[in-house]
Image (cartoon, grey):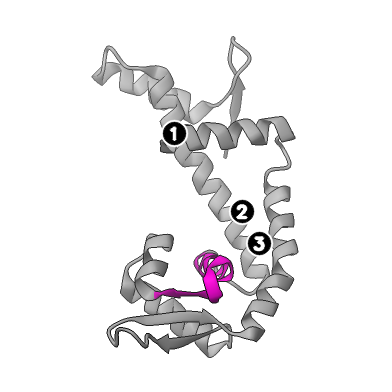
Amino acid sequence: MQQFTILDDGRLSDSSVLSSIEDLREDVPDLDEIAVESHMMLFKTYAAYFTAVSSRYEELGLSHARFNMLRWLHHAKDHRLTMTELGAHLEASVPNVIRMVQALENDGWVVRVPSEADRRVMFVELTGEGNARFRALLPQAISIWKEVQSGLSSEEQAMLSHILAKLRV
């Protein structure tokens, strides 16, 4: 069960994270508590966010990974990417990409198209039907994102986006 605490400085934190920090102090006397707290909070938040979004994508008939594959294809030039490009975008191995492509192909979302320039290269392309189906899902997906973030104001969402981008840099 999650239990949150309001700290003396007004920040909200997770009681289990604070307890972990206390335990770590024994092993690391000069512990940077804020760095540890933000690390743990980021991972706990990612897990909760991923779980919430994934369960809602399943209501749309897609896994989180398949939704993201379709999103990348939808936004790609000519709605097509190579298997390698998809793997890079999804941070997935080519064998995993191949399995997802096969499933989406069986459901009529995508087709595989050999490269005319290099026979070793295989493109994955959204079908016309797949693109239309994805476009129809987009408003629902955006509604999911909005709902999952509904506890944050627009200003907090903008700040979160800024902080996450800064962390990635």
Point out which mark residue 68 bears.
none
| Residue 102, image quadrant | bottom left
Position of 83 with respect to 140 (left or right) is left
Spatial distance from mark 1 to mark 3, Cα to Cα?
Answer: 27 Å
- What residue sits 66% from the left and 62% below the top? 56
User: Marks 2 and 3: in contact by CB < 8 Å?
Assistant: yes
Position of 108 with respect to 26 (left or right) is right
Q: Main secondary structure of the magenta part?
A: helix
Amino acid type at image mark 2? Ala
| Residue 108, image quadrant | bottom right
- What residue sits 56% from the left and 54% below the top? 51
Question: Measured from the top left, where is residue 26 in percent x and y?
Answer: 28, 17
Amino acid type at image mark 1? Leu
Question: Measured from the top left, where is residue 147 in percent x and y?
Answer: 73, 49
- What residue sits 72% from the left and 37% below the top? 151
Position of the C terminus by quadrant: top left
> Which of pointers 2 and 1 lies earlier in the amino acid sequence?
2
User: Marks 3 and 1: in contact by CB < 8 Å?
Assistant: no
**Numbered range of the magenta stretch:** 65-82
- Check disc 3 and report the residue beneath it: 56
Q: Secondary structure at mark 3?
A: helix
- Check disc 2 and report the residue beneath it: 52
Question: Measured from the top left, where is residue 92 in percent x and y?
Answer: 36, 64
Spatial distance from mark 2 to mark 1, Cα to Cα?
Answer: 23 Å
- Check disc 1 and report the residue beneath it: 167
User: Marks 1 and 2: in contact by CB < 8 Å?
Assistant: no
Q: How many marks?
A: 3
| Magenta region includes residue 139 | no
Q: Secondary structure at mark 1?
A: helix
Of circles 1 and 3, the one toward us is 1
| Residue 91, image quadrant | bottom left
